[in-house]
Amino acid sequence: MSKMSAEGKSRLTEAAHEAVRGKPISGDTLKLAALSRERNPDRTLHSDGEALFTEHLAERGLSFTPQKAIGPYNVDFAVATVAVEILGGGWHAAKHARHALRSPYILDAGWHLLMIWDYEGRSALRPEAADYLVTFLDEVGSDPAAARQYRVI
């Protein structure tokens, strides 16, 4: 591969994509892919918002797992029992059908879910969002048997 031209790599990649296009992907394959993303978070594309929130978490001394695999999905961060998603850019709003599947799956898997909107001009991704997470962690940590909660900032 290292000796192959960019055009050759492109043809090879397109052939691989064509071979699987339209074929269903098994749940096991999706779960393995999610685990791979969790184990290699540096290989996953991160938004500026995720990078900023990482700083907010570190400033508060919170331990977290980036790109945490929850079944076939990855959430941006896992902090204790809370899965955190940073929703940036207009494209997340267009993916409401996908979130309608993801969110119940995450909640049913035993996680609380906090979604933080980060879009130009009206971002909720400020230090106060991390403070909110700390308060949420205290609240849900006081009753581990509480029903899973879904919150949006």
Image: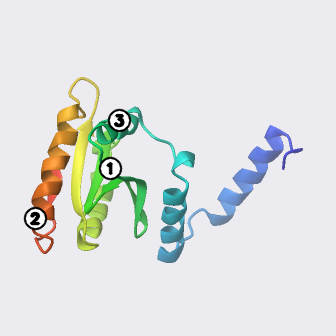
- Relative to 115, is 17 on the left or the right? right
Depth check, front residue: 133 or 36 = 133
Amino acid residing under circle 2: Ser
Q: Position of residue 148 (x, y in %)?
A: 16, 67
Are the residues at dot 1 and dot 2 in contact (C-beta closer than 8 Å)?
no
In the rendered structure, the answer to whether residue 51 lies left or right of residue 108 reads right
Q: What residue does disc 3 label?
A: 55
Q: Is residue 52 visible?
A: yes
Residue 56 spot, x, y in % from top left: 29, 36
Q: Nearer the viewer, mark 3 or mark 1?
A: 3
Q: Are marks 3 and 1 in contact (CB under 8 Å)?
A: no
Q: Residue at x 10, y 69 (%)?
A: 143
Label 3 or label 2, whichever comes before in sequence order:
3
Classify 70 as above or below 54.
below
* Residue occupied by mark 2: 142
Tag 3's secondary structure?
Answer: helix
- Using the image as rendered, state which of residue 135 and residue 129 is in the foreground: 135
Mark with earlier residue (3, 1): 3
**Which image quarter: residue 97?**
bottom left
Q: Does residue 28 appear left or right of residue 61 in this picture?
A: right
Q: Which mark is residue 95?
A: 1
Quick one: label 1, few (<14), some, or many (20+) residues within 10 Å? few
Callout in the foreground (1, 2) = 2
Vertical placement of 3 versus 12: above or below?
above
For the residues marked 1 and 2, what is the alpha-carbon distance in whole angstroms?
A: 33 Å
Secondary structure of residue under mark 2 = loop
Q: Earlier in the sequence, mark 1 or mark 2?
A: 1
Where residue 30 is drawn, which disc sits there?
none
Q: Amino acid at mark 3?
A: Glu
